[in-house]
Image (cartoon, grey):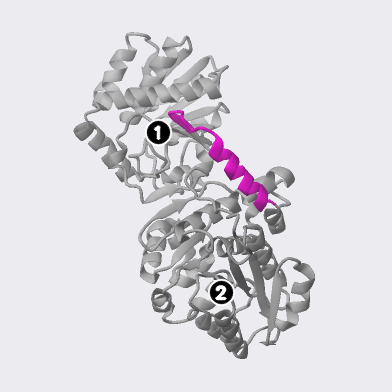
Amino acid sequence: MKILTSKEISQVDKNTIEKTGIPSLVLMENAGRSCVEVILKEFPFAKNITVVAGKGNNGGDGVVVARYLQKLGKNIKLFILAQNEEKLSFDNKTNLNIFKKFSNHFYFITQSDLQFLEENLNTTDLIVDAIFGTGFKPPVEGYSKDVIFMINSSGKPVVSVDIPSGIDADSPFFDTAVKANSTITFGYLKPCHILYPAAENCGKVFVADISLDDTYAPSYRQLITPYNVSLPKREKTGNKYTFGHVAIIGGSVGKSGAVIMASRSASLAGSGLTTAIVPKDINQTIETNLIEEMSIPVNCKNGTFSKESKDEILDILNKGKFSSVVVGMGMSVNEDTVEVIEGILTVKKPLVIDADGINNLSKIENFKDLLKQRAFPTVLTPHTGEFSRLTRLDTKTILKNFESMASEFSKESGSYLILKFSRMVVFTPDGKIYYCNRGNPGMATAGTGDVLAGIVGSLLNRLPVEDALKLSVLLHSIAGDLAAAEKGQESLKATDLIENIPHAYKEIELQRKIKRDSLIKRID
């Protein structure tokens, strides 16, 4: 499923009207009718419904909603935030004139009419928010801000048309915005529907097909779903080497759990063999906690890898039958570990760099050049703090511009990026972006990143790199959701995710069997 920015959706809209030949009024009719379908399904007992519309085409969609609900026998009041109909867009005005044929319960609202509007909002069963659409850019100005406050203070359920009014379609951040129970967007998702905190204001999100011409919609930015991921096959003639041998390198005294979790995750994701390469001071702990997985101890200093262990590790990797390498979790950061990471960059195998591996990498002056020179795929899995160290930019700047910054970093370094913040987003060196809208706040706990790294390392052996990353992120997120459903978010542990990896596979397989032939799709 494609994700478009406000500029991109505007261009698709324009091309559909001018080149494909579908009139804008037809698109507006389709949009309004789609909203009504969702309203009837989600709020079947709402009899008294208040529609609050703006002056533009989003308001026009709202007027269509009001007409259909009126025809279906609902008690409708339509409030338009404008002085008169001369202030409305052409399509909005056209639909208002049609609405007048069915009802005279419409009112133009200005600053002096707010008390009248508020009284209606407080006594209705449902509010339809159609004030601002995808073309809106914050901040909210004038009495519209008061109206949004009234909607949120009413205590009534709210359905937003396209996006909750006050939110920028392209950004997760906002000042004043409607908090909706459900949002029906048209044709394609927008970033605000996926990224927190804006996504929380959207409530349940439905995507309605209103006949926009898909040939004009760019496809480089997509949502990861069970329907667009590839699953690895378990060949009947295969053996344990067929399914890959993952090397997990990391750990230090006090941080042995990171390697244990990554190793167990790699096995459950389908790796034929998994070997943990760890400082000898923690090897007994590793051996005690791993059963199916193997371990190789190497020399260390002060409980972590030393300069001397670098050559030992490289010898193990180059001589062993490893098909992918995962490095970084729990390994600590010092001069010696920086050298270890620099050495591992020379290994001719797919490489996943996580956690302290990223922190060590950031201390290498020319690390982007070293990444670019690698002939095998390199995957970095930073959270925003680690990405800040890589880019030497503060997290606030990154959060505001994460998509452009991460895309640029991926291209410049030739590496794949899984950026972990309110949602996980995958970036590829050729400019593709994959968003995941699964997962929950309970996953913000120690060790969940180690679990992801292990899954990625395993699947890099089984699938093309983009497919491996998409499936890894989805598996990890669904495993988190399944764990939260069982244990709640507050007590969620990384090991709960590991136990749910097999169930996440089953969930994806089950979803892929369900037909998705409706023109309106709920995004879970």
Q: Which quadrant would the C terminus be assigned to in this image? A: top right
Place of residue 257 in the rendered image (x, y in percent of width and height, measured from the top left): 71, 68
Circle 2 SS class = helix
Residue 84 appears in the rendering: no
In this orientation, which residue lies closer to the viewer: 301 or 224?
224
Residue at 65% over, 67% down: 273
Amino acid type of disc 2? Gly
Amino acid type of disc 1? Ser
Q: How crowded is mark 1: few (under 14 residues within 10 Å), some or many (20 or more)?
A: many
Labels 2, 1: front one: 2
Whether 519 is among the magenta residues is yes
Q: Is residue 316 above or below residue 494?
A: below
Whether 197 is among the magenta residues is no
Q: Is residue 183 above or below residue 86?
A: below
Q: On the image, numbered disc 2 is attached to which residue? A: 357
Q: Is residue 255 above or below residue 11?
A: below
The image quadrant of residue 155 is: top right
Place of residue 267 in the rendered image (x, y in percent of width and height, measured from the top left): 66, 62
Residue at 28% over, 36% down: 13
Horizontal side of residue 455 vs 117, given as left or right? right
Q: Distance between the residues labelled 2 and 1?
A: 49 Å
Horizontal side of residue 86 vs 174, given as left or right? left
Segment tinted magenta in the rendering: 500-521
Circle 1 SS class = helix
The image quadrant of residue 15 is: top left
Place of residue 239 in the rendered image (x, y in percent of width and height, measured from the top left): 62, 63
Which mark is drawn over residue 115?
none
Q: On the image, numbered disc 1 is attached to which residue? A: 144
Place of residue 47 in the rendered image (x, y in percent of width and height, measured from the top left): 53, 14
Kindly give the residue lying farthest to the bottom in the view shown: 308
| Number of callouts | 2
